[in-house]
Structures are given as C-alpha cells and as structure tokens.
Amino acid sequence: MSEWTTALHDWNLDPADAVAKQREMATRLTLTPPWGASPEAWPATITGVDIGFEDAGEVTRAAVVTLDLATLEPLEQQLIRQPTRMPYIPGLLSFRELPAAIAAIEALERPPECLMVDGHGIAHPRRLGVAAHLGLWCDLPSFGVAKKRLCGKHGEPGDARGDWVALTDRVREADAELGIIEDTALPRREQRSQLGAVLRSRAKVKPVFVSPGQRMNLDTALSMTLHCLGKTKLPEPTRLADQLASRRLKRLRDA
DNA sequence: GCGACAG
DNA sequence: ATCTTGTCGC
C-alpha cells in the first residue's frame, strides 16, 4: 500500500493532483435528474453501493445490491475483493473506494439504473464526494446517504421519521456552475450553498446526510431515500450493501 | 494558528 | 472502516 500514488485506472495521483482532479470533475456534474421526485417516473431498480475492509485495511470489499425499486426486493448482488491501493484521507475517499466499487458494478448482470452510495454526493469540500464521483464515472444518476457530516452546517431535524433540515456550506468554486447557491441576490459575503439534507430516517436515532450526486437533485434524492426506508435507519439499498460488504455477516452465517 | 475531518 | 458482548430502552 506504499505505491498508492502510482495508479488508479488511468490516473496517476498524489493528494495534490487528486484535489485538482476533483475540481475539474465537479465541473462536469449535472444536477438534473432524468425523472422527478414522484415514484411513477422512476426506473425499475436502484443499486446500493458500499465498501468494507479486512486484514487491517489491506483488502477492500465492494458490495453492490440491486433492488426492485417498487417492492424493495433484492434482485441481484455482487461482492468484489481486491487489494487496497490507497490510504484513507478525508476528502479523498473516492480514490480509495472507487476502483473496487466500479469492479463490483461491472460484475452486475443487470445494468444498474440508479446508484445509492454510502457516503456523500456533492456535500464535499470540492463537491465531489464518492457518490458524485461514482455517478460521474458510470454516467448514472446517483446520490449519497452518509452517516456523518463531512462539511457544511445544519440545525437539528425534528424527531419524526421524514423530518429534515438543510445542509449548507460557504460558497465554493464549483457552486455557481452547479446552481446550488441558495440566494444569488444576496451579497457574496452572505451567500450559502445548498448541499443536501440532514434527514431523520428513524425516530430518535441520529440522522443521515442525503446529498445528490450525478444527474440528480435534492428533491429526488430525498424522495428516493424516504421511499427506500424500511424499519431501520439506513435505507434498504445501502443497508443491504452494508451487511454484504461488512465482514460480520460472512462470519456469523456465511450465506 | 487551531480545529474538523465521509469510510 | 475495524477491533468486540452484553445490555439498556422504546
């Protein structure tokens, strides 16, 4: 894991180059979904993506689970294991997790139509969290559902499932182009950017952070997340990918 | 200069 | 993320 700077597909990146690459890629994001916030126009499936590790991080495990979006029944799943090539660096998570995630997605027999990723979408310092990066790479609508905040500020959402508050951040480089500055009429000094939502997915449980990725907006990402909610804090696609990627399931009852 | 910091 | 059992509470 010492030569992690050497190759990620066709990239040859050290941290500074990765950051530059993120700025460039954020430029190519399109926050317009092919369908709206109402279920009638949505695709037939949604694919949950998550990454886990073993051997003190030496091995990366990428799991993808495709569910029928109407019934939330699992249709197909893939699990890929490969040597880890990069350490974890806050803000550069996608460079560590994407190679394996992409391999898992390519292994799917049924082409994914929409991706729900464990992590952030544009709720990232340079607006390119894992979900956005992966959606851009696959050219698929994508959004992120993260368990912790990476950047931005927010209040406390209400107690009921479905309650949410906005996650906003100071305006950054890509924001005008992305169209996420909430009030362009305000003095530059007071402008804020709309990154996503802090959603109470389950009563009395810490909220999750929902943010759009590629070809997606907050309304639709929120609607889809709520629609995919089962009885737990995490929506089904991500929850299932999570238990697949996490080694505990394999240890307890390997099947 | 001092924190904060997805998985 | 991961190392880890039982346990308190809705």
Image (cartoon, coloured by chain):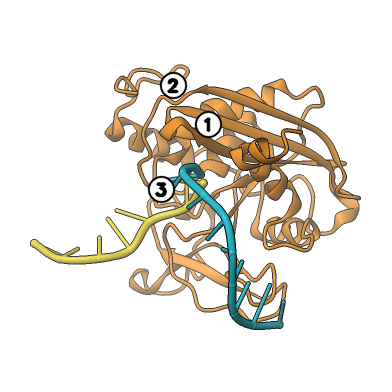
Chain colours: A orange, B yellow, C cyan
Distance from the alpha carbon under mark 3 to that under mark 2? 19 Å
Question: In front: A153, or A2?
Answer: A2
- A84 relative to C8 in the view: left or right: left
Question: In front: A218, or A70?
Answer: A70
- In terms of image quadrants, where is residue A13? top left
Q: Amino acid at mark 1?
A: Leu
Tag shown at residue A167: none
Q: Secondary structure at mark 1?
A: helix
Q: Are marks 2 and 1 in contact (CB under 8 Å)?
A: yes
Residue A7 place in picture, x, y as percent: 39, 18
Give me the chain letter of mark 3: A
Residue A89 visible at all: yes
Tag shown at residue A8: 2
Disc 3 target residue: A126
Disc 1 target residue: A98
Q: Residue at x 77, y 36 (%)?
A: A113
- A28 relative to A43 in the view: left or right: left
Give me the chain letter of mark 1: A
Residue A207 visible at all: no
Check the image and report above or below for A54 versus A148: above
Q: Residue at x 59, y 47 (%)?
A: A118
Residue A198 place in picture, x, y as percent: 58, 68
- 3 or 2: mark nearer the eye: 2
